[in-house]
Image (cartoon, helix red, strand yellow):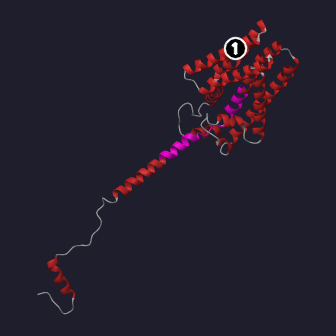
Amino acid sequence: MSSLDKSTGADQDEAPDESAPDNPHALTEAALFEAFGGVRGLVETTVPGLVFILIFTINQDLRSSAIAALVLSALLGVARLVRRDTLKHAFSGVFGVLVGVVFAMVTGNAKDFYLPGMLYGLGLSLAYLLSAFAGWPLLGVILGPIFRENLSWRTRNPGRKRAYVKASYAWGFIFLGKAAILFPLYWWSDPTRFGWVTVALKIPPLLLAVYLTWIFLAKAPPPIDVIAEMEAEEEAEEAAKAARETATGEQPDATPAQAPTTDPDQGDDTAESRLPGRHRR
């Protein structure tokens, strides 16, 4: 990171560790872990498919393999709920496995257990590529709220936008390459071999994409904490409002200037003294 980037980060208000740009490597790593579920998320997306193909390899029974994968996925989801983890990660794995089980049971083909995930990966790769080409990189839309920068990188942080574009292209091409391997195998390979190849290609491409994202973002300018800016603006508005209320509250208490009063008994004398040719007796 250049000295200009460092000075930019130093100019920002000091914030808690999760939003401070002092350590971009740690900040980026934490954001990526939060977005993609961390090591536990990788396990939850891989183990059910591994159990499915393992049992199917042993007994060639689609029903028992599907039930075992679904039960294991449900247990992992329940464990997340017990730990009060993010509901998104708790239900996404269960939903994915459930859809795969439905596909496989309806068609009677064990390879269809992996078909929904393949279609999802292909669609995701196209979304990454098209969004990056259009100047709205999908990775920036996903990670912006986690970095507390929302969409400020599009107009206020061009260096960070370029990093999101590069990272989105990386995700798109990596998942597109994975699809280029799996779809031919889906048509030409037997279910057992196809299942093992699918499981083997589950984590490495994801780790590569996350690693490249970490490199791009760690070298990019730090995120602009728009949440902190909005909170500061709200505090400033409240302070100004309180100052106005204090000023207006003191106004009625001030004693207005009044004209000097005169004694009623002296009023006539005063008036008479102002007439020409008349003197007070």
Q: Horizontal and vertical percent for residue 50? A: 73, 14
**Quadrant of residue 160 within the rendered picture:** top right
Residue sitting nearer the eye, 46 or 27 = 46
Residue sitting nearer the eye, 171 or 220 = 171
Asked if residue 113 can be seen in this view, the reply is no
Amino acid at dot 1: Ile
> How crowded is the residue under tag 1: few (<14 C-alpha within 10 Å), some, or many (20+)?
some
Q: Horizontal and vertical percent for residue 221? A: 66, 37
Instruction: Specify the farthest residue to the left.
Output: 281
- For image coordinates 59% across by 26% down, the residue present is 87
**Quadrant of residue 124 within the rendered picture:** top right
Find out whether residue 231 is within the magenta segment. yes
Q: Horizontal and vertical percent for residue 93? A: 67, 22
Quarter of the image for the C terminus: give it: bottom left
Position of residue 250 in the picture relative to residue 197 (left or right): left
Find out whether residue 246 is within the magenta segment. no
The correct choice, above or below, for 51 with respect to 11 in the image is above
Q: Horizontal and vertical percent for residue 136? A: 72, 41
The correct choice, above or below, for 86 with respect to 267 in the image is above
Asked if residue 31 can be seen in this view, the reply is yes
Which residue bears the numbered disc 1? Answer: 67
- For image coordinates 21% across by 89% down, the residue present is 275
Q: Which residues are magenta?
A: 210-235
